[in-house]
Amino acid sequence: MYKSTLKTAVILVIAAWIANSIFAQVADKPVTFCNPISLDYGTGRARRAGEPVVVLHKDDYYLFVSGAGGYWYSTDMMEWTYVVPTGLPIVNSPPSVIIIGNTFYFTSSVRPEIYLTTEPKKGVWKKEADLSREYGDAALFLDDDGRVYMYYGWSQIEGIKAVELDIGRERCG
């Protein structure tokens, strides 16, 4: 009888330990989570960071998001410096950024323009080109051969389209 009681107690302890391990693992994986990167929006407004674009230039990461009123840069992706740009209309639409050499090019879905800067940490931008129209969900793409394309389209019917851009000319598209 003693062996049977001891065996039952050992089984119960093992079962309790397994159950505790299972419930502890479930508790370690919360249903909701918070972005671990704490960004300073510089304005005290609600934190909104939609459609992020990150580009790497000279060991610095640059983060652009829609509706932020600016952008950030970081060397380690932990500590971020907020930049309020001049000459760059940051709007509530997805940004698109590419780098050619030392020049950053920026566009968004609702502004039919391309802007550029060679000093992104200073935040001084200028308009480089007017596009022939607005391009929904615009995404700039620099191909291996140096040609620049803008992919666009937010229609489920028409699909994704592309247009080649000649960055540097007065008019693109």
Image (spheres, helix red, strand yellow):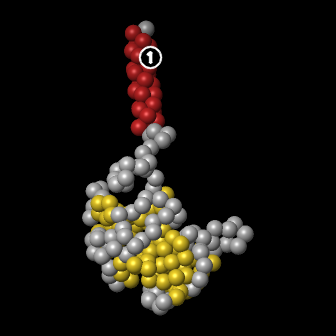
Quadrant in the picture for residue 120: bottom left
Drawn side of residue 79 relative to residue 158, left or right: left
* Res. 52 in view: no
The residue lying toward the viewer, choosing from 125 and 23, is 125
Residue assigned mark 1: 8
Taking the spot 51% from the left edge, 78% from the top edge, the residue there is 113
- Residue 158, compared with residue 38, is above or below; it is below
Residue 125 or residue 163, whichever sits in front? 125
At a point 45% along the width and 56% down the height, the residue shown is 49
* Identity, as a three-letter code, of the amino acid under mark 1: Thr
**The N terminus appears in which quarter of the rendering?**
top left
Q: Is residue 65 above or below residue 1?
A: below
Q: Residue at x 51, y 65 (%)?
A: 94
In the displayed structure, would residue 24 be above or below residue 71?
above
151 vs 89: above or below: below
Quadrant in which the C terminus appears: bottom right
Going by the picture, which residue comes out furthest to the top?
A: 1
Q: Position of residue 144 (x, y in %)?
A: 44, 86
Say which of 67 and 19 sits in front. Answer: 67
Q: Residue 98 lies in what quarter of the image?
A: bottom left
Q: Position of residue 153 (x, y in %)?
A: 63, 72
Instruction: Give SS at disc 1.
Output: helix
Q: Position of residue 54 (x, y in %)?
A: 40, 66
Q: x%, y% of residue 161?
A: 63, 78
Neighbourhood count class around disc 1 (C-alpha, 10 Å): few under 14, some 14–19, many 20 upward: few
Q: Nearer the viewer, residue 135 or 155?
A: 135
Residue at the image position 53 percent from the left and 64 percent from the top: 93
